[in-house]
Image: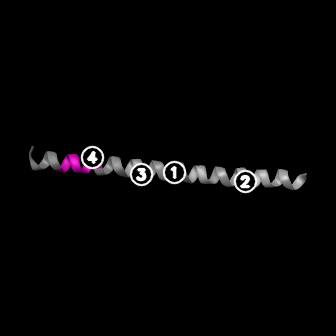
Amino acid sequence: MNTLQSAAIVAATAFLVLVFCTGIKAACRKKLKQDKNDKTIHGRFMGEK
């Protein structure tokens, strides 16, 4: 394997890891937001009773 191939593989791997991490962060943020909304809705219903 020459240097160019090695550099390309390292760059591709780094890019995939970055995309993967960004996706996980976005999913977690979405879930966190959803949980917060669920609690708020639940709190409202409990308050009405």
**Residue at the image point whose x is 9% and y is 43% from the top:** 1
| Residue identified by numbered label 2 | 39
- Residue 21's tag is 3
Judge left or right: residue 38 versus residue 5: right
Of the two numbered discs 2 and 1 on the same chain, state the one appearing first in sequence.
1
> Quick one: 43 or 15, which is closer to the camera?
43
Alpha carbon of mark 4 to alpha carbon of mark 2: how far? Answer: 41 Å
Q: Amino acid at mark 1?
A: Ala
Crowding near the residue tagged with mark 1, few <14, some 14–19, many ≥20 C-alpha atoms within 10 Å: few
Q: Which region of the structure is painted magenta?
A: 7-13
- On the image, which quarter does residue 32 sit in? bottom right
Query: Which amino acid, by three-letter code, is at mark 3?
Result: Cys
Kind of residue at disc 4: Ala
Q: Mark 4 against mark 2, which lies toward the viewer?
A: 2
User: Is residue 7 or residue 21 the one in the foreground?
Assistant: 21
Query: What x and y, as percent, mark residue 23?
Result: 46, 48
The disc labelled 2 sits on which kind of residue?
A: Lys
Q: Main secondary structure of the magenta part?
A: helix
| Rendered residue at 58%/50% (across/down) | 30
Read off the residue under disc 4.
Answer: 12
Q: Residues within 10 Å of mark 2 (few under 14, many from 20)?
A: few
Q: What's the distance in space between the residues labelled 3 and 1, CA to CA?
A: 9 Å
Q: Which residue is mark 1?
A: 26
Q: CA distance from mark 1 to mark 4?
A: 21 Å
The answer to whether marks 1 and 4 mark residues whose Cβ atoms lie closer than 8 Å is no
> Magenta stretch containing residue 10, yes or no?
yes
Secondary structure beneath label 2: helix
- Relative to 45, 28 lies left or right: left
